Image: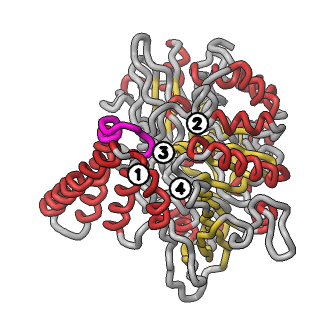
Amino acid sequence: MTAGPGSAISAIAIGADGFYHPINEDQIIALVKKAYAEGLQVRCRGASHSIAWAIYTDPGAGDKPVPNKVSEQHPPKGPNINIMLDQYYKVTWLDEENGIIEVEAGIHLGYDPEDPTHTSTLRNSLLYQAFEKGWALEDLGGITHQTAGGFLSTGSSGGTLMYRLEENLLAFRVIDGMGNAEWIENDKEPDLFNAVGVSLGLLGIISKVRFKLTRNFYIYGQQITTPTDADNCPIDLFGPGTKDKPSMQEFLEKTPYTRILWWPQKNVERVVIWQAVRGAPLPVFDAAPYEEFADTTFFTELEEMGGALLFTLLGNPGFFKAWSKLQGDFGQFRKNIYLYWDRTITKPFAWLLSWLVTILVWIVSLPLALFFSIFRPVLLWLYPKVVDILQPLTKNGKAQLFMDYMWRSLPMDNNADDILMGTEFTEIWIPIEHTEKTMQLLKTLFDEKGYAAQGFYSTELYAGIKSHFWLSPAYDVDTLRVDVFWYINNEGNPAARDGFYSQFWQLFRDNDIPFRLHWGKFLPEYDYPDWAAYLRSQYPRWDDFMELRASRDPENILLTSYWRTHLFGKENN
């Protein structure tokens, strides 16, 4: 169905930030029609939690590309059209009794602290508005800063093999590459629905989503930190399991919600096991939220600033390079503590105090950074001891227990600052039956190559439930997800031919472990034809998707050079 006229394009002024900010669907359609008529690219960003080149258009001729980083808030310069839906986040209750809603695609799942336009709040988020009326979603990812459209477009998922977010999805309203808008409903057009479910913005711009929500539930869980050896870990991480101890695969299959952080470094060797179950709301409920860092906001900020200092020094040999990168972190630290104090003390005093504390932290950090840059072996010697302080082993049965509203603690990483704890990764989705072999291969690689493979960060292990969406990395199979973390300030490109991630991709290919990759995270940036052929071989509906893509975007206004190289192995398909 062709939607309303692409009128009033002159009324949609480009913002000073380089984005168009439509307030309704007609304006989005008008922008798409402008791109279609003038041969421009058009892309729509969510919360920028994918790497930048996967989100934005190509730069204009002679303009530089933006850094290919997560949380890149600025689009490239040039004539192409980059859209931000920060003014487009309305919730409409179609059937409150049965939990059926329509949401505009720019709505954030939860509060986004890095929203550059400051329109995101807890109260206008999807999860909070649903919670207030007694509803929830089946599953959530590790954070809820994303917009609904962005989260769904890249196949993001939480850590469960029992609950499927897809069960909450009824329909997508999509504007194709010619400016035609239509509702695509699961019960009427299941094939088209499953193609659009994970479409990377290549089948059109998602305008709205229709959900059938789940009755609200609470989560009850615990987190423990244990050594990885067989005698002390409650999971048989690398073996088939025993009578008294589940294998890794069995643990993932039988635990309702879980996430594991694996620190494989010598003298660290531990796993942080977060796990939770659903529970009905209690008549009297005294929430005890999950706390990832310190239990007060100010000390959380100090802890995260300390983490930024540690990981930046470890990832950047040489004082000047590391210190230069840390300046942005000091700025983020000052902003965070100002916002915290601004709620409790007068504004001028909050501003002054935040500056004074930041200057003090800067002064203390300077000699530390200089010393450890010169005497790097001392930093490496201290590293296991610092991790032991930041992530101590659980002792005397004192697990961290939590019980909370699902929207607040099911996304267990919401409290991690996107800048101070900025984390990039490649997310490798592997069929669940290969779990034991995968864990053994990773352990061997870590043991043989040390920090060159282990890095100085943890490796995250999740489950991913089978999906019906054609380009979902979990299409038609339950998966183990291996998230190889990379601190955002680290030197170098981890996705390059000899970059940090290449050893993991090659490890699995050399050992016949099939895998798919999260589309919003790092993909290989080398040997494009070979990798495009490999990805094609992993998706049974690949050719169907590409044929549909060509019909819905005949002028390729949605297809950037980034997606051409990764999907087709060349600039022109």
Disc 4 vs disc 2: Cβ atoms closer than 8 Å? no
**Closer to the N terminus: mark 2 or mark 1?**
1
- In the picture, the disc for residue 379 is 1
Q: Classify mark 3: helix, strand or loop.
A: strand
**Closer to the N terminus: mark 3 or mark 2?**
3
Which secondary structure class fits the magenta region best?
A: helix
User: On the image, numbered disc 2 is attached to which residue?
Assistant: 500
Identify residue type, mark 2: Phe
Q: Residue at x 40, y 46 (%)?
A: 376
Identify residue type, mark 3: Tyr
Q: Classify mark 2: helix, strand or loop.
A: loop
- Mark in front: 1 vs 3: 1
User: On the image, numbered disc 4 is attached to which residue?
Assistant: 143
Furthest residue to the bottom? 284
Identify residue type, mark 4: Ile
The quarter of the rendered structure image containing the C terminus is top right
**Closer to the N terminus: mark 1 or mark 3?**
1
Disc 4 vs disc 1: Cβ atoms closer than 8 Å? no
**Closer to the N terminus: mark 4 or mark 3?**
4
The crowding category of the residue bearing disc 1, from other C-alpha atoms within 10 Å (few below 14, some 14 to 19, many at least 20), is: some
Q: What is the distance, in whole Å, between disc 3 and disc 2 at their CAs? A: 11 Å
User: On the image, numbered disc 3 is attached to which residue?
Assistant: 487
Q: Is residue 25 above or below residue 351?
A: above
* Magenta span of residues: 314-323
| Magenta stretch: includes residue 493 | no
Q: Is residue 516 above or below residue 230?
A: above
